[in-house]
Amino acid sequence: MGTSPDAALRGTHDKAMITCLISGGQTGADRAALDFAVQRGIPHGGWIPRGRKTEAGPLPERYRLQETTSGAYAERTEKNVLLADGTLIISRGGLKGGSLLTGTLAERHGRPWLHADLSRWSVEEAAGRIRGWIRDRSIGVLNVAGPRASQDPDIYEAVRSVLEAVFAVPGETGPGEAPGVAEREKGAS
């Protein structure tokens, strides 16, 4: 299936900016990050459970994710946390389910992570905190995670709005105000 994400992404790491967005390919937050990367021409990748498993069926091949050896979501989650220079979890409210596991694994492995709680901050406030965290932690490969669509039907658009604001070119008009980010950082590298 080609080069593993580890080999493909580590060679492109530039500490000054995001060089690659990765996710686990699930519906909702994960898919929003992948679609954003494809639309913007940002390299993307990551790990996905065997069979390209998501709650909506197999992830289309156009997404450049590598399958794990098992169909377990937890294996994919851990591999993405370890592959990334930092993990951004975007949700509304406290972490639960796979998002909670993602934060727990990042903490366990001493990997930088940030929880963007969109019930507490505007999109612009979130984007500013995320940009600062990326800069301060020299994040090149960014893992984006959060709820699946069945847990939060509106998370896809919320994640897209946040990423648009994070990557906005100065002087561009950003997306309108929306609920924002609660910063929580663990595991300095």
Image (cartoon, rainbow, N blue to C red):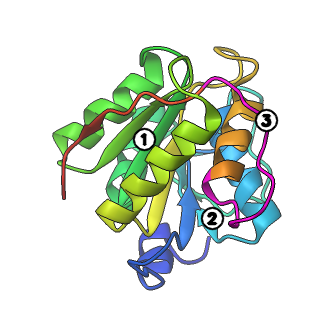
**Which label sits on residue 77?**
1
Pinpoint residue 163: horizontal percent, then vertical percent. Answer: 65, 49
Q: Secondary structure at mark 1?
A: helix
Horizontal side of residue 188 vs 74, given as left or right: left
Pinpoint residue 60: horizontal percent, then vertical percent. Answer: 80, 50
* Residue at the (70%, 27%) spot, across then down: 178
Q: Nearer the viewer, residue 22 or 8?
A: 22
* Residue at the (37%, 40%) spot, across then down: 114
- For badge 1, the amino acid type reads Thr
Residues tagged 2 and 1 counted as in contact (Cβ below 8 A): no
Q: CA distance from mark 1 to mark 3?
A: 31 Å
Precedes in sequence: disc 2 or disc 1: 2
Pinpoint residue 15: horizontal percent, then vertical percent. Answer: 38, 77
Q: Please give the residue where the numbered disc 3 appears in the rendered image.
A: 176
Precedes in sequence: disc 1 or disc 3: 1
Pinpoint residue 69: horizontal percent, then vertical percent. Answer: 46, 50
- Which quadrant of the figure contains the N terminus? bottom right
Q: Name which quarter of the figure residue 7 lies in.
A: bottom left
Q: Please give the residue where the numbered disc 2 appears in the rendered image.
A: 44
Answer whether residue 7 is visible to the viewer in this image.
Answer: yes
Q: Secondary structure at mark 2?
A: strand
- For badge 2, the amino acid type reads His
Task: Examine the structure image and report whether residue 25 is included in the region drawn in magenta.
Answer: no
Task: Examine the structure image and report whether residue 169 is included in the region drawn in magenta.
Answer: yes
Q: Which residues are magenta?
A: 166-179
Q: Residues within 10 Å of mark 3 (few under 14, many from 20)?
A: few
Residue furthest to the front in view is: 171
Give the main secondary structure of the magenta stretch.
Answer: loop
Q: Name which quarter of the figure residue 118 lies in.
A: top right
